[in-house]
Image (cartoon, rainbow, N blue to C red):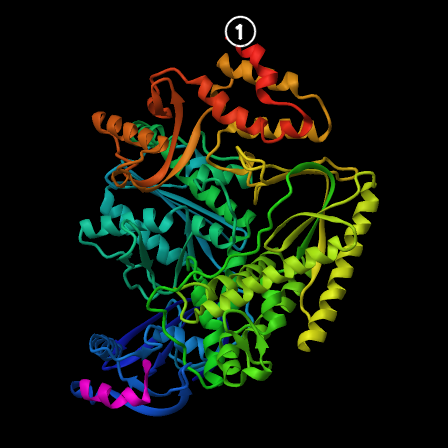
Amino acid sequence: MKTTGRGFLLSRHSYDRQDSTQIDLWLATDDGPVKLSVTNEKPVFFIRRKDADNAKALLVGWSEQYITQLLSLKTFQHDSVTGFYFNSLRSFYDAREHLLENNIELFESNIRLADRYLMERFTRGGVAYIGDSLGEKNFSSIANVKIKPTEYIPHLKVLSLDIECNVNGELFSIGLYGVAKGKVYQRVLMIGNPENVSSEQSYIQWVDNEVTLLKAFERISLDYDPDVYIGWSVVNFDFRILCQRADFHGLKINIGRNKTAMRWRNNQTEPGQGFVTIEGRVVIDGITALKAEAYMLPRYSLEYVAQHFLKKGKETEDVDNRLATILHDFKFNKPKLAAYNLQDCVLVWEIFEKANLLDFLIFRSHLTGLELDRAGGSVAAFVNLYLPKLHRHGYVSPNLPKDGGLASPGGYVMDSIPGLYKNVLVLDFKSLYPSIIRTYKIDPLGLVEGLKHSESAIPGFKGAVFDREKNLLPDIITELWKLRDQAKADNDSARSQAIKILMNSFYGVLGSGGCPFYDTRLASSITLRGHDIMQQTAQWIEARGLQVIYGDTDSTFVHLDESLSAEQARQIGKDLAAYINAEWALKIKQELGLESQLEIEFETHFSRFLMPTIRGSEKGSKKRYAGLIKNHGQEDKLVFKGLENVRTDWTELAKQFQERLYAMLFREEDPCDFIKRTVSDTLAGKQDALLVYRKRLRRPLDSYIKNIPPHVKAARLADEKNKQQGKQIKYQRRGWISYVITTQGPQPTEYQTASIDYQHYIDKQIEPVADAILPFVGMSFKEITDAQLGLF
């Protein structure tokens, strides 16, 4: 019976069945899960027509496994290509490997079958379908499918998961939490003999051992039937351990929608990392989702993120003590451990809600075709959007650059004019790089076509010229721009953020050696055009008698007459933006016959502003400044860029000291007593809680040989002590270390034995912060503190 419907794509799987291919697309729909089965799609790669005969000779043993077809498609070098279409994935992969070993260049050989099927139909997150209904007990199965794109916003059924275990991964409990149709579901599967608990802990389900724990988790998953599992490090910790413990017991955890086993696959390039596959379901890690939505936090522990978003969290972040507590509670207080386990599930759920993480990922999928659980994916998103359009213009994708790609020029950064100012405006170009792409038609196809008749093309940089009509990326960005404007009008922050991240990724993708469309002429034509735009904008501003004190990528900082009122300054900012926009529209029209898409906006008025010098120099710094924004009727706002206040590798002492000191000087208050008190309190040991450094170990400890930085010394000392005490060796392969500087050098906070070296903190944390601003008001740190320091 023919049936139609629509849903949201959860997972995609391709495999061979009886010497042909099958693609299974799992959807979430209003009527429950649906599996769409697509058969006999042929995996394909392309070969230059002049190389096709050699390829066929090498594939003599595969003659019944593929067909060839002469195509109208060409490479970017204008060579015609032949398509090689295979009956099965196995024959496709075997042939691909054999041809590459024999130096036959293949095009688009790394595109997965399901991805190609979807992208060529311009189908991303939402799928409309028609096919034959086969009927299944727990889901709808549709065969002989045809699909097309649709806008469909799903109501996903989500289950938050967290496990508790010992250091060897032996499971103690599994916590689960969800809310479906307004009804709360909470369960903690706990190994142990049943205990009497209060009615508030009726969520505990007692199981005999690890095997029954895993089987109970399987039953609950099938009964609750979530579309999505969420958690914290849930893939590389929770699900990895669940898979390992199942393997240890020789079990299969059959929680796929069609009761297939979940599968683990190690990441070949990242030791200790991997991927979990559950047919018809998705596993989303909260840390990955936050980073995808461009949240930049100092750290991503569940405790820190919960405090940031929810203003609540766990009682401690101390991993050693927490592990010891977990071991103790499993032996002596399992109800307490169950409450702790469930709390983690609830915190993750509430963070996802507060940060709109699922909404963002759903919109991202609609825009790009990326899976909900995909980390990164800027290149894949670009290929999904660009490649099917490119095919319809007669070209196949190029391959990755063999040399990994040459570096392209970065964004424009002007030499700053250091000083402590009153009345500084910031003018920002709205999405400068996407605007440049739209205005100057910068595009891979446009470059190929432009080089064919360069005399009428739009000039770029490094030999690039771009066709005025045949291009794709400017229209893609224009459409995204309209969608974002609508999202802003609708106050739809998740959709707006998804579009912004996608648009801003295009420059990076075109300048990345990991993208098949990489070309240094493309990236350079964006950034070097940006240089010209910023320099010309500064000239126009200065021609009006104003001073430009700094410029960075898309922002221009303008110093005004210090006697002007805030209202007068803001009006000048608005007038300047209108003037510059008009000048660019005229210039681009006259010189190139193009419509300007550049738009500069008056962004900020700083009543006070500091542009510091480079330490030890009179030269102005770059990407470092601070300013005070006065909000009428509201609290004044301090802004720090690149200074200690926003850097994760400086102590809390430096950050708090800087914020207070700058606030005082911006308000023209005398800071001397505050500086003296900070120094005396530090030397007296009253600031010890603020003296901890926290720094990331970016490499394995044994890779540091010649220069051993303080945080590495502290980490090595910590693991020596851990080993002596039989604790987990936790700092060998990256991670974060907290330490203090003592009279005996750097020591980890968990093993500090020596006294704190207070003079280090005066010299390296307080004095540099003070002397970045004090000279601008005729003071110095040493003059203020020398007499006082003599008392200690």
Sort mark 1 into few (<14), some (14-19) or many (20+) by Cα contacts within 10 Å.
Answer: few
Of 563 and 634, the residue lying toward us: 563
Can residue 732 be seen by looking at this rendering?
Answer: yes
As helix, strand or loop, the secondary structure at mark 1 comes to loop
Of 424 and 688, the residue lying toward us: 424
Which residue is located at x 51 percent, y 19 percent?
687
Could you tell whether 652 is left or right of 722 in the image?
Answer: right
Q: Which residues are magenta?
A: 43-58
Query: Is residue 52 highlighted in magenta?
Result: yes
**Count of residue discs:** 1
Which residue is located at x 34 percent, y 61 percent?
278
Q: Position of residue 418 (x, y in %)?
A: 64, 39
Q: Position of residue 705 (x, y in %)?
A: 26, 37
**What amino acid is at disc 1?**
Leu
Could you tell whether 434 is left or right of 724 in the image?
Answer: right
Q: Which quadrant of the figure has residue 328? A: top left
Which residue is located at x 47 percent, y 57 percent?
157
513 relative to 145, above or below: above
Could you tell whether 458 is left or right of 306 in the image?
Answer: right
